Amino acid sequence: MDSHYDQVMKAREQADANAPRRYFAYSTILDRAAFDEWKHQHSYGFFELPEGRLAEALDVDLVYDFPSRWWGGRVAGLTDAPGARVYGRLFEIPGRDWPIVQHKEGFVTSMCVERTVRVRVDGQEVEATAFVTNPRRASSDGPVSPRFVEALVRGAKSAGLPADYVEKLARGESR
């Protein structure tokens, strides 16, 4: 358990259980084994990420813009990019569980912020929330983290993202 657990659990108690959130996940949370390890390290073993649906965020691209000491290099966020797309999975998260997702994504520590993205799923466009680098913490200093790219690729494969997109991730390509 870390120092944010009590904060997250209090937010969870106060959340509207009847207000689910659409969550577009495109990063390491898609690596189920790594996510399960994180859950157990932070005492969230009770939380299960739903199956989710294959989706693509429209008019955005990956950008490696957050230098992470834990990952040993820069990790990915999203940037506006007309015509580009980022694949991931769209999840419906119960309102009471949203604070756990916020913790995992780094919102609780101000590493990231929430933003709305347009997402195509099952042939329809919907709005969803994604997490992106907090602009105050964005930087292109230093190398991209190879360990992060490996986790990104593992997650993309296990999430069933398109093979050509997984290959792009493996090359570390972004804007």
Image (cartoon, grey):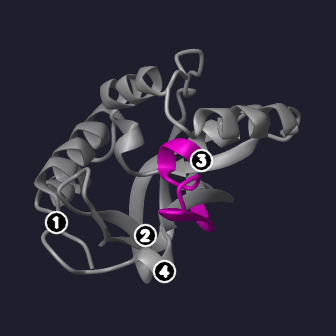
Q: Which mark is residue 136?
A: 4
Q: Earlier in the sequence, mark 2 or mark 4?
A: 2
The numbered mark, 1 or 3, whose residue comes first in the sequence reads 3
What residue does disc 2 label?
Answer: 78
Question: Between tags 2 and 4, which lies in front?
Answer: 4
Q: Of the residues under marks 3 and 4, which one precedes in the sequence?
A: 3
Q: Disc 3 to disc 2, how far (Cα)?
A: 16 Å
Kind of residue at badge 3:
Gln
Q: Can residue 159 be seen here?
A: yes
* Front residue of 35 and 11: 11
Judging by the rendered image, the residue that carries numbered circle 3 is 102
Looking at the picture, how far across and down is residue 154, in whole percent? 23, 37
Q: Mark 3, residues whose alpha carbon is within 10 Å: few (<14), some, or many (≥20)? A: some
Q: What stretch is highlighted in magenta?
A: 103-119
Mark 4 vs 1: CB contact within 8 A: no
Amino acid type for the residue under numbered disc 1: Val
